Amino acid sequence: MRQTPHMEGKRVEAFSDGVFAVAITLLALELKVPEDGGTLVHRMLAIWPSYLAYVVSFLTIGIMWLNHHTMFTHIVRVNRALLLLNLLLLMVVAVVPFPTALVGEELGAHLRGDDAKTIMATYGLVMILMSIFFSAMWWYVVLHPQMLDEGLPSRSIRRSVPRFGFGLFGYVLATVIALVSPLTALVLFGLLALYYAFEHLPTARKLDPDAGAATG
């Protein structure tokens, strides 16, 4: 009886992988060298904020894909609510290349202008939404433990919840900082991506008769 939901989960993961891959590919397509502005070397160096925005967005999407894959290795059942949360997450992931391109262009021209602050704050809002929807997916399955692998220690599951909350708080803080220093905010977004590169999801382990009582 568990095989059908499990297969549905694999289909969700496969569809999600496709969206993550397209979003990352579009990031590279937004890297464009301006036609005017001196020699080719000078023009390439002048768009360094675009390179930085690309790296930050690539790491954010790539590491989120990695954690998304890890999450679905723990999920043995899916339902409509989880599918909807996953769809909302993918909706935001797919739009990341748009603000990334704007951030690179604007920071390349004005590091501290009002437009740069507005665009960077918009970029931050996209990051916040991604963090909210990804965290909501994990929080949802934590509140419905029947959807999770029985080999997950409940203590590790409980500890994983505030770790995701800390990242969300960080995105909010970086977005506020964007209204003062857009470049500093972009660097903080990159550091937050690296924060999520560390394992924050619990590690599954096999249960045995003696260890069963120690999982609570």
Image: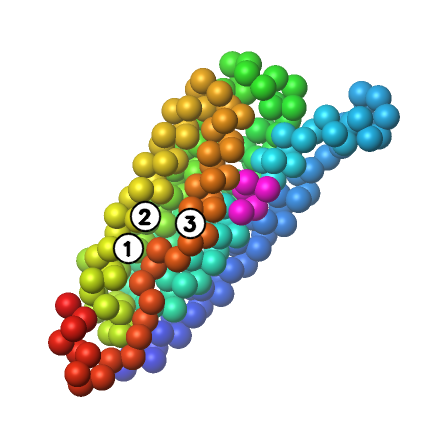
What SS does tag 2 mark?
helix
| Quarter of the rendering containing residue 75 | bottom left
Q: Is residue 37 left or right of residue 183?
A: right
Q: Which mark is residue 164?
A: 2
Question: Three-letter amino acid code at disc 2?
Answer: Phe
| Quarter of the rendering containing residue 76 | bottom left
Q: Residue at x 51, y 33 (%)?
A: 187
Q: Is residue 188 left or right of residue 106?
A: left
Q: Which mark is residue 160?
A: 1
Q: Residue at x 24, y 55 (%)?
A: 159
What SS does tag 1 mark?
helix
Q: Is residue 212 left or right of residue 1?
A: left
Viewer can see residue 27: yes
Q: Which mark is residue 196?
A: 3
Question: Which numbered disc flags the more N-terminal residue, 2 or 3?
Answer: 2
Question: Three-letter amino acid code at disc 1?
Answer: Ser
Query: Would you say the magenta stretch is mainly helix, strand or loop?
Result: helix
In the image, the segment drawn in magenta is 55-59
Question: Which numbered disc flags the more N-terminal residue, 1 or 3?
Answer: 1
Question: Three-letter amino acid code at disc 3?
Answer: Tyr
Q: Which mark is residue 18?
A: none
> At which x and y percent is residue 198?
42, 54
Residue density around tag 2, few if under 14, some if 14–19, many if 20 or more, within 10 Å: many
